[in-house]
Amino acid sequence: MLETKVLCSSVDQTDFSVVLLSTMLLDSLWVLIGLGLLYFGADWLVKGSSSLALRFGLSALVVGLTVVAYGTSMPELVVSVKAALAGQSQLAIGNVVGSNIFNVAAILGIAALIFPIKIQFQLIRFDVPLMITVSLLAMFFLRDGLLERWEAAILFCGILIYTIGSLIYAKRHTPDAVHAEFDESVPKVQGTMWSDIGFIVGGMLLLILGSHFLVDGSIGLARTFEISEAVIGLTIVAAGTSTPELAATVVAAMKKEADIAVGNIVGSNIYNLLCILGAAGLVHPLEVGGVTWIDFGVMLGVSVLLIPFMISGFVLKRWEGVVLLAIYVGYIAWLWPK
């Protein structure tokens, strides 16, 4: 009788392990499919939108500052909005905070290792301080553990003001060399107007499907490994949704297009906090949950660290890239056991 009970217990344990492994593999597959769809969705959206905008006479600089900048951040937007609609506030906020940390510490670190990045004074005088200011504003709104709709509305209005201000400043003060960089980096006009529309529609569909798979798979993995949705958002989701920025920045660094390499990251971080956090909060008030003040502190800290790095010779050097990467690796090592 005892042997029978032991045998049954062993069989039950084996069945449970098989089910657990199957669930984990399926959730991992959804995450991978979601990341792939998000990457190609953003690529198609940028390609179609850029071509259509250039077809209607907009300059490459304007397209780069608006269509390309917004298009590469669309994965974060659709994932955070999807998470907010599903009531997964921790995932939505973790995605934004984690993406900003990944952008500065990992992507800029990698870019600086590829080639030391020359820094324009405009970044130190205005863009990076604005990124830090916006970070502080978001942290202030979230100090009570909740982002309410009126606070989200203020953030969302901020992205409209920032975009208009950037376009006005760029038209008046951008040197010819920077115009040439954007002319080379922005996707060219290809095919017909209908093919542009097809890429835009197809890209949006891929983004929507990708966000669905990524959010559902991430939540499943969090439950399987018994870790918080916030940690999944800060790591897997954040790094995954930042792949368009990673690709664009690495390519720009290899081509020695410093303005695009750094400007893409700083602009993306501002966009994440103002537009994505704002849009997600407008859809549904967001609770901070498992995203801690240490996470916000790392986001703010790596942003502040950029100023002395950039001022030192107006170049982001290789050893500074190593420091940024080391900070990110250390942060992930500290975070993951949670």
Image (cartoon, helix red, strand yellow):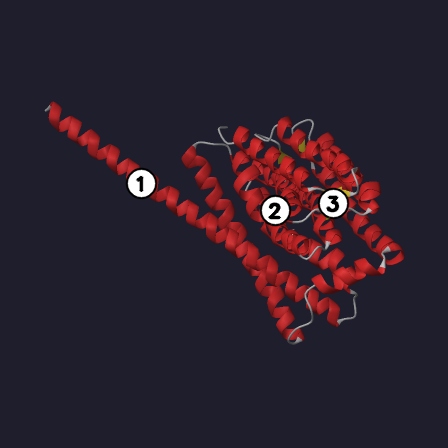
Query: Which residue position holds label 1?
Result: 19
Query: Which residue position holds label 3?
Result: 156
Q: CA distance from mark 3 to mark 2?
A: 13 Å
Asked if disc 2 and disc 1 are in contact, CB closer than 8 Å, the reply is no
Q: Is residue 151 visible?
A: yes
Q: Name the foreground residue: 159 vs 152.
A: 159
Amino acid of disc 3: Phe
Query: Which residue position holds label 2?
Result: 81
- x%, y% of residue 272? 68, 44
Q: With 335 as the anchor, is 314 left or right in this view? A: right
Q: Residues within 10 Å of mark 3 (few under 14, many from 20)?
A: many
Q: Residues within 10 Å of mark 2 (few under 14, many from 20)?
A: many
- x%, y% of residue 119? 78, 46
Q: Residues within 10 Å of mark 1 (few under 14, many from 20)?
A: few
Q: CA distance from mark 3 to mark 1?
A: 43 Å
| Disc on the earlier residue, 2 or 1 | 1
- x%, y% of residue 311? 80, 38
> Farthest residue in the left direction?
1
Residue at 18% over, 31% down = 8
| Disc on the earlier residue, 3 or 2 | 2
